[in-house]
Image (cartoon, grey):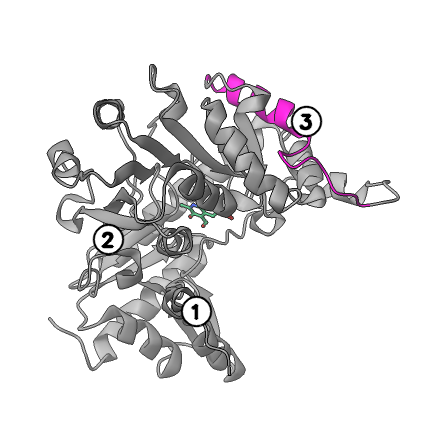
Amino acid sequence: MPKISERGIHLPPSPIRKLVPYAEQAKRRGIEVLHLNIGQPDIRTPDEAIYAIRSIKEPIFAYQHSAGNESYRRKLAAYYDSIGLGVAPDDILITTGGSEAIFMAMCVCMNPGDELLVPEPFYANYNGFAMEAGVNIKPIFSTIDNDFALPPISEFERHITPYTKAIFICNPNNPTGYLYSQNELDQLKDIALKYDLYLICDEVYREFCYDGNRHISVMDLRGVDRNVIMIDSVSKRFSMCGVRLGALVTRNSDVIASALKMGQARLCPPYLAQVAAEAALDTPRSYFDTVHDEYERRRNCIVEQLNKIEGVYCPMPKGAFYSMVRLPVDDADRFAQWMLEEFSYQGQTVMVAPGSGFYASRGLGHDQVRVAYVLKCEDLRAAAACIREALALYPGRTK
Ligand SMILES: Cc1ncc(COP(=O)(O)O)c(C=O)c1O
């Protein structure tokens, strides 16, 4: 029998999805599973997008331009302009989700064997994309003890080798909720310029910043146009994760030209998604204000409820809709599985994403889980109650 490739064998499973079979079994036993494991919001997609799909009259759902439809890129550029980013339609390559933009950025900016510096914990799928692209993630450790603040810039410099090609950050951060300050971004920019590195920033949670904090985009940084790449997506902004549309944005025309060759190989981003996303750009401001306030409420709710549980620490995220939570358990992977296989409280249990998958360094995150506060406060309270009761019963509790 022909063998699976080394790459195929070693690709990491998603920590966000790997417990799905256990959740399905729990559901078959009649238990309601509260999903805190995945950033799938229960917020309604804007009507503008839904109606646009319903009103399609095209007799043929045809291939589109490989860079994305011009009308959509123009409208998206106008949206970026409206938030002060100064992006031209030609600076945008429309992708199949932010996921494809991440993969393309890694492929066109880096050679196999090159290294990229990523503060950890980080969005777990970066591991998979890096492996597919043949590049190596060099994690820069950030700790829950100071709520995952950006490590000192000296840490980034210490990890730079002749193979380092890029710094990759996520702002606001999934999984930590950390929001980068102007000063931190300026320091990263200085390093990018000093060592001639790409500065790639995943900004798919741009709209989700709390406590009056303003998001600062890498596209706002001056004098680094050739270094900076922004990853964007409609998934979270418009609560339409299933549409699968994102963008790679950069003023570096060589990066766009190279990424477009990958774009041509996959022919085009999805047509229906572009119809929905273009229409979604007409969503009124009030939609975002309501959604923002709802997430802030949910964040306050889950942080308060979890921190009431003895031995649990949940930092207060400044953005996105996740938190990395420390639990008094021997092994968060085992605990997460146990909650699905052996535990229920009032007919419910909780699915969380075990923390270790969000680290590249071995041995880290074993007492952490990522929670996504994408459910209504009432469900979040029920989920926190389940976690409290589960910790009281779990045989591997540590303190
Ligand atoms: C930080 C981050 N980047 C990228 C993505 C992928 O986005 P998309 O659905 O646009 O592929 C996600 C999805 O959860 C994410 O959390």
| Sooner in the amino-acid sequence: mark 2 or mark 1 | 1
Q: Tell me the residue at 44%/38% (across/down).
A: 108
Mark 1 C-beta to ligand 1 under 8 Å: no
What distance separates the C-alpha of mark 3 from that of mark 2? 44 Å
Mark 1 vs mark 3: which is more N-terminal? Answer: 1
Type of residue at label 2?
Answer: Cys
| Label disc, if present, on residue 128 of the rendered structure | none
**In magenta segment, residue 298:** no
Residue denoted by label 3:
70
Cα separation, mark 2 vs mark 1, equals 40 Å
Nearest to the observer: residue 158 or residue 49: 158
On screen, residue 27 above or below 185: below
Residue 382, given in percent of the width and then of the height, sits at 39, 64
Residue 194 appears in the picture as rendered: yes
Residue sitting at the far right = 59
Checking the image for residue 5, the label placed there is 1
**Image side of residue 184 versus residue 296, left or right:** left
Q: Indicate the amino acid at tag 3.
A: Glu
Residue 269 place in picture, x, y as percent: 64, 42
State the residue position of label 2: 314
Extent of the magenta region: 61-84
**Distance CA(mark 1)–CA(mark 3):** 39 Å
Classify the position of the C terminus by image quarter: bottom left
